[in-house]
Amino acid sequence: MRLSTFKSGLGAVVATFATSVAAFADDTLQIIGQPTNGDTGFQPAGTIVARHLQGLEGMITDIMAAIVIFVTILLVVVLVRFNAKANPKPAKFTHNSPLEIAWTLIPIVILVIIGAYSLPVLYLEEEIPQADVEIKVTGNQWYWHYDYKTADAAFGFDSYMIGSPATVDAKADPGVVPYTLNDAMVAKLKKSGYGADQFRLAVDNPMVVPVGKTVVVDITGADVIHSWKVPAFGLMQDAVPGRVAKAWFKADKEGIYFGQCSELCGKDHAYMPIEVKVVSQAAYDAWLVSAKKLFASADAPQLVQVASNN
């Protein structure tokens, strides 16, 4: 239904909405949250939660590294000083009270330090604040659906990976093979303002939110368990059919942030990306006006260029 509607309504969308879309398109959006080949660190933190999570990970890694180094040094000392050649007559004591107290208390102190930092971070992540924008996110095989509700309207739209069959029209996209990166696919991505590096990341209809506002997402699944994950936001929440879970984020900076479904959900699990465009309040308000018109009808074609990064 969605694909046939897309094909029949494409011309009408372009004619009707090209002017309004251009009016609020932001050509300066920077791609911030994106995986990079060869990198081993985190994506840039885009929220306060992500910054605290990355700080917690760094602190625990430092503690573990110090423990490993300390234990390794102890092992080397024991091997050198207490081998059979260097110490032919071994000691016969059975315990050492000060040492036993030390190796009991020191781990307790370490765990208290970790807990004192991690529990507030967990509270920050799990305590849902008052929402400025609330969006329902539904995972489907294999795309996301976003439902917005404002004071004067409610609308929703599907979000497919650019290059999935639902976004490919044989006449408009000659040579494009679904899920395949070739010259025609690169041209299709370029038409939407992306490059080859955004293949399997960019979507036709991204989630759009205003910068610096608290966004609460109500996450569920329509068929099987999915997981809505945006690493730069420090956000990952399973989408379970029959249950609604809440999560939140407040993006610090305008830009484009990518994520992926992170729960194995079927054969096309790898083609279920997430894209969030964080825009200024003015651009968001303008997008809302256009999106309300475009997505007000269930039969409306599911296509709109929002906050374009051309």
Image (cartoon, grey):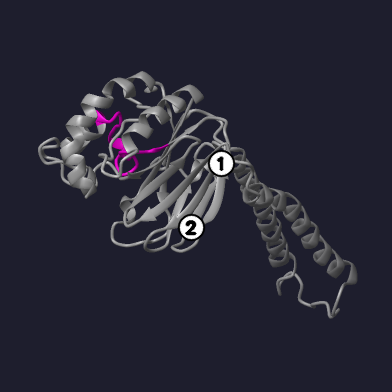
Residue 265 percent coordinates (x, y):
36, 61
Horizontal arrangement in the rendering, residue 307 relative to residue 179 (left or right)? right
| One can see residue 167 in this view | yes
- Asked whether residue 197 is drawn in magenta, I would say yes
Q: Which residues are magenta?
A: 190-207
Amino acid type, label 2:
Asp
- The residue wearing badge 2 is 238
Q: Which residue is mark 1?
A: 249
Q: Is residue 57 highlighted in magenta?
A: no
Residue at 20 percent of width and 43 percent of height: 5
Q: Position of residue 158 (x, y in %)?
A: 33, 45
Q: Mark 2 or 1 closer to N-term?
A: 2
Question: Closer to the camera, 310 or 299?
Answer: 299
Q: Is residue 179 visible?
A: no
SS for dot 1 = strand
- Drawn side of residue 23 relative to residue 182, left or right: right
Q: Secondary structure at mark 2?
A: strand
- In the displayed structure, does residue 19 sit left or right of residue 213? left
Tell me: 177 left or right of 19: left
In the rendered image, the residue lying farthest to the right is 98
The percent position of residue 1, horizontal first and vertical second, equals 21, 50
Vertical position of residue 266 compared to residue 166: above or below:
below
